[in-house]
Image (cartoon, rainbow, N blue to C red):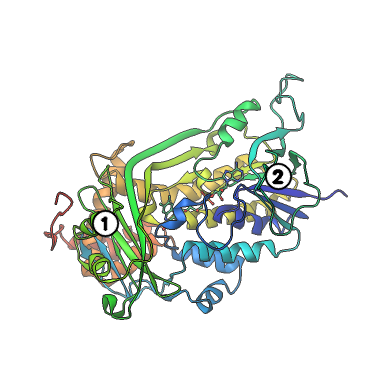
Amino acid sequence: MSERRAVVIGASVAGLLAARVLADSFDRVVLVERDDSPGTGWRRGAPQSRHLHGLMERGRQIMEELYPGLTGQLAAAGAPTTEVLRESRWYLSGLRVHPASTGLTTLLASRPMLEGAIRERTVRLPGVHLLTGRTATGLVTAEHEAPAGAAGGGRPGRITGVRLALPTAGQGRTGPVDPDSGGEDVLRADLVVDATGRASRAPDWLVALGHERPAEERVDVDLGYASRTYRRRPGHLDGDLAVVVSTMPGWRGGGAITLEGDRWHVTLAGMLGDHPPTDHAGFEAFAATLPVSDVHDIVRDAEPLDDPVPHRFRGSLRRRYDRIAAPPAGFAVLGDAVSSFNPLYAQGMTVAAQQALVLRDRLRADGADGLDPARFHREVAAVVDVAWQMSTGSDLRYPGVVGPRTPRSRLVSAYAARAQVAAHRDPAVARTFMRVANLTLPPTALLAPPTLLRVLRSGAHPAPTRGDRSDV
Ligand SMILES: Cc1cc2nc3c(=O)[nH]c(=O)nc-3n(C[C@H](O)[C@H](O)[C@H](O)COP(=O)(O)OP(=O)(O)OC[C@H]3O[C@@H](n4cnc5c(N)ncnc54)[C@H](O)[C@@H]3O)c2cc1C
């Protein structure tokens, strides 16, 4: 029997989690990554890593299931852990969420530390090979060089491999390398997984082979981030480990979380073009305009360890592979390549983890040779739906946000605004709200009768303490 091989394009969080589950079903899993050497610090292929990255509880649980002991491993390596809402302050619309007990864990590892740990555990698995410094440039079909369907006039064929640009001078490989791949520009595969992130070229690659392009949905928020790290002193925030201040149009926000190595990671954020500056004085002045003073208190007092770096996020983007009439066999897409969410809701890594479980369960049901692409993408879409409705539903509350509004989304937005006020006053609502936000409970939990009553009784939003400062 010939060796069964999967190729994953992109070795960031989604690609690594995909490789982890594929290793259970395939003899060989080759991860193709454009970055030369992912290393343990910031890297070019994942520029978002320089900005605050919260891991939601559902994501942590799944990673713990896939890599037993991961939380303890990261804690032992210096990542602070605490309970959500304990030793951490959450402000929504300028109101502090009640510091209730939630039973949810916050793992405050930096994004490079988290990614580095799952990479190290993934490439250690038997049969997994990481090929670095190689860029995928296209897909191939059974017909290989000729566009599928062109030769025989039939339906576009099964995806059977990946084209790689030949390595340029200076590009190298690190980690265990697939011995079959040297010098070739086509990597054969029984299953190709695209995990190349938001800028995925897979839609073009599919069209070039005669397949249908997935439709796209967008909700534009024009969000700007600027981030910087600082030396942490124990007295900051009275010893608390994290503060998160929600960002909305007209309300600047951001957060500060403690990282391994006694550092603060501070991110400032503004929507609809109101972006934080990256010069020292401008960064501090922007922090002073948040509706609460906690982040500014740190920025004013702590020693900066680097310069602020910007990131612009234009909007949430979803590719509807689930709506392609005849999706190609041998091909699956996950992570930001299928759904890229407004990062303010910190959903991306958790949804990638949920999608990895879909892949695992589909492979268990269909077998490595028979993954049903239509069913896979429908199940991925069901996972995306929940997070998408939560985050875009919240964003669409604001008139400047561009995207499709429905009567249902208007109702959900109005209710969510009221639930935020209730979460400030009522520990039971705070607990449910945080569990929903952490994707451990479905949003319908906020509509269960006792919670519904508490939310409806909570009243409207009171005047914020520091007011809308974004015009300062
Ligand atoms: C500013 C910002 C803040 C965020 N904050 C959070 C947060 O707080 N919490 C959270 O859960 N999520 C957050 N996210 C989302 C999170 O970063 C992603 O969801 C997560 O990284 C999973 O993405 P991915 O692995 O699909 O893609 P990416 O992380 O974008 O990785 C894609 C990988 O593919 C490689 N690649 C690309 N093209 C090719 C090619 N042709 N050939 C080979 N390799 C290729 C890249 O080098 C890269 O390694 C944030 C995102 C942004 C932009």
C-alpha gap between disc 2 and disc 1: 46 Å
Q: Amino acid at mark 1?
A: Phe
Determine whether 14 is above or below 331 in the image. below
Residue 204, given in percent of the width and then of the height, sits at: 57, 30
As drawn, the residue found furthest toward the front would be 169
Residue 381, given in percent of the width and then of the height, sits at: 51, 45
> Toward the viewer: 149 or 232?
232
Determine whether 425 is above or below 249 in the image. below
Q: Is residue 166 among the parts visible in the rendering?
A: yes
Residue 54, given in percent of the width and then of the height, sits at: 42, 62
Nearest to N terminus: mark 2 or mark 1 = 2
Determine whether 274 is above or below 347 in the image. above
**On the rendered structure, is 309 left or right of 327?**
left
Secondary structure at badge 1 equals helix
Image quadrant assignment for residue 211? top right
**On the rendered structure, is 356 left or right of 144?**
left
The residue drawn where x is 32% and y is 70% is 303
Image quadrant assignment for residue 328? top right
Q: Amino acid at mark 2?
A: Leu
Mark 2 or 1: in front is 1
The residue drawn where x is 54% and y is 57% is 353
- Badges 2 and 1: C-beta atoms under 8 Å apart? no
The residue that disc 2 covers is: 191
Q: Residues within 10 Å of mark 1 (few under 14, many from 20)?
A: many
Residue 283: give its label.
Answer: 1
Secondary structure at badge 2 equals strand
